[in-house]
Image (cartoon, rainbow, N blue to C red):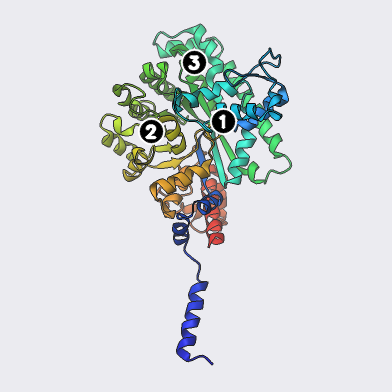
Amino acid sequence: MLPRGTALLLLTATLFAAQPVSIERRFAELKKNPPGLYAFLYKMPKGADLHNHLSGAVYAENFLETAADRHLCVDRAALALLETSTCKPGQPDAAAIRSDNDLRNALIDSFSMRNFVPGRESGHDHFFATFNKFGAVGSSEYVAEIARRAADQNESYVELMALSGGSVNSLGESVGFNGDFEATRQKLEAAGLAKRVAALKDSLDRTEQTRITKLGCRDHADSAACRVQIGYVYQVLREFPKEQIFAQVLAGFALAASDPRVVAVNFVQAEDGYHSMTDYHLHMQMVDFAKRLYPSVHITLHAGELAPGLVPPEGLLFHIRDAVELGHAERIGHGVDLMYEKDPQSLLREMRDRHIDVEINLTSNDGILGVKGDQHPFQTYRRAGVPVTLSTDDEGVNRSDLTEEFVRAVETYNLSWADLKELVRNSIEYSFASGSSYWKDRAYKTVVDACAAGRKSADCRAYLEKNDKARLGADLEERFAAFERTTN
């Protein structure tokens, strides 16, 4: 028989060993083990990806498979797909990728940032050039791919920039623009703007039907991929003349006001382009005008996706502020040039007080702008109390996914488990999902009164039924609880 003291020590040690390791301690250990960290974060609930371009989210391999099935032609010199199946000499059938790995690999590198090395071409130029190289395929049929990837990574909601305003450019060109917003609006309405908006709705109907069919949601509505909620964001293509931009803006606001599937309006394309820079303030004035016509429409704007040297110093002074103060932005995409803006501290206070979220895209900002680590304002926003979320931007072109964005943030900024939960909760709280929040305030300490007695109470069930955002928030908490149980 063991002495009483020895037995007590052994019993104490056994009980201590049986105690579950706290999630914070477990997470701290994983930060020393990159493969283990990735596996942990892959399974972690991630809430929403709020900044995701559909065309840039598709992996090159999938574009190539579709091109091969359609027997599109390849421009060998440009390493791009052509909108034809009648191939000229020197333009191989895209089906050649199935037997010619050299061609396939060259096209993948051309369509993405894979293996990119700056030289004669910058990361910025290579990135933005990719879209014309695979554009012949189109991207509306790939929403199912995005939903599957999101479901696999324990995401519940994606806001997808997928509707282009380019279809109304001809209308804007025919009407013109003389600086009189109201008179031009009336001309656009008379010229048939409503029909163009209806055509955009029809296009979205087809996109959604394709998603449902590819995922089998009619028969398996409860599958993880079918449960991922998709909100569509209308894209104004900012690199066009002002008369076309104004038509795009009005069409987008009219669409978002009339179709609940369209949750917001945004401006896309390179922010340093000619029209983007020359007409930036005018573009924000157009948004201000449209917001007064359609006050319920949500707005998220690419602003500050710039870095020193890319544009003259004066080009860095005002984009974020204009988006916030004139463009009514509820969220900012990128916001990289923050500290080069006029009076950045007052801008930070304003964004904090107005709860304007910043959609942070770490991989994209590194590859396109060369901004990373301590040079990135990620921690500056957080220290100032400005809400931030992590997002992918163009996960296919960047050869990334939302898990990689979290890995990068953890490894670069030594984030804690509490930090991650705040970032994830922000993604639902600052989403444009309909209805009210699950939380009483944005400290995430107390749920709304209707759910104070628990999610299964009659009051809470009724509240969640009426409020998509609250339902997503409650679901996220259940996912966190399950994840933390299984991790311990």
Instruction: Tell me the quarter of the image containing the N terminus.
Output: bottom right
User: What kind of residue is marked 3?
Assistant: Ala
Label 3 secondary element? helix
Look at 36% across and 38% down and name the residue there. Answer: 376
> Are the residues flagged by discs 2 and 1 in contact, CB closer than 8 Å?
no
Q: Position of residue 441 (x, y in %)?
A: 40, 48
Specify the quadrant of the image occupied by residue 132. Answer: top right
Residue count near mark 3 (Cα–Cα under 10 Å), binned few <14, some 14–19, many ≥20? many
Which circle's residue, 2 or 3, is located before the other in the chain?
3
Q: Is residue 207 visible?
A: no
Look at 51% across and 48% down and name the residue there. Answer: 473
Residue 266 badge: none
| Residue under label 3 | 247
| Residue under label 2 | 335
Give the CA distance from mark 3 to mark 1: 22 Å
| Residue under label 1 | 54
Label 1 secondary element? helix
Give the CA distance from mark 2 to mark 1: 21 Å
Which circle's residue, 2 or 1, is located before the other in the chain?
1
Q: Position of residue 372 (x, y in %)?
A: 39, 38
